[in-house]
Image (cartoon, rainbow, N blue to C red):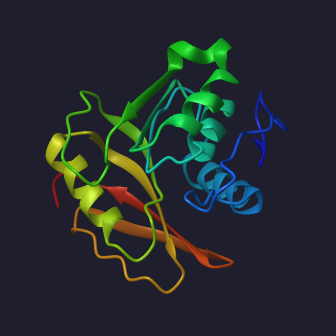
Amino acid sequence: MRIVAGKYRAKKLIAPENDAVRPTSDRAREALFSILYSKFGSMEGKTVLDIFAGTGALGFEALSRGAASVCFVDIDVQTLQKNARLFAIEKEKIRLIKKDASKPFHIGAQFDFVFSDAPYDKGLNEVALSCLVKDGALKDGAVCVVETRKNEALCLSQNFVLIDERIYGMAKIHIYIFHQNV
């Protein structure tokens, strides 16, 4: 697993040797960030939240592409800590939070982009995004990228407007825009 593009292109990320984490493939990440760039422009200066972060591949990819800051949330941060050390030069832009993203918690910031890649078939993406809305963590117009199993149903509030969906192997990537007042 590696960073696909940006200033850290080809930097290898550490992945756990067990099946507890299911990182988004390099191919899917490359396609996703191409779609995001074509629809929303550069990541330059954007604030990013990566929940159910696992290895942090999505957030570190955003950092490589110019994100101003990336906040990672996961219940197990061991792999995230190892990967964050690979980006020590950017440490002031990286925040790690050891929390269950499907439980309410206060982040104390608002984000332009959110990546949510919860364990499949448990409804945790919906719960986590609902918690973020209640916390006020999403800027109006925030882009929310949600990964599910390709046949998994995803039911978000009307504040989330679906703008694109793509299937990559067994995964489906959903791209939403969040609107505070719908």
Q: Is residue 46 left or right of residue 2?
A: left
Residue lying farthest to the front in this orientation: 18
Task: Give the quadrant of residue 113.
Answer: top left
- Residue closer to the observer: 11 or 65: 11
Q: Is residue 66 visible?
A: no
Q: Residue at x 53, y 35 (%)?
A: 78
- Where is residue 88 shown, x and y percent of the image? 65, 15
Task: Give the quadrant of residue 108.
Answer: top left
Q: Is residue 162 visible?
A: yes
Relative to 129, say whether 98 is above or below. Answer: above
- Where is residue 153 shown, x and y percent of the image? 38, 83
Q: Is residue 169 left or right of residue 144?
A: right
- Where is residue 98 shown, x and y percent of the image? 37, 35
Q: Residue at x 77, y 61 (%)?
A: 27
Q: Residue at x 48, y 59 (%)?
A: 117
- Where is residue 61 shown, x and y percent of the image? 66, 40
Tally of numbered discs: 0
Residue lying farthest to the right in this orientation: 10
Relative to 167, say whether 47 is above or below. Answer: above
- Residue closer to the observer: 111 or 25: 25
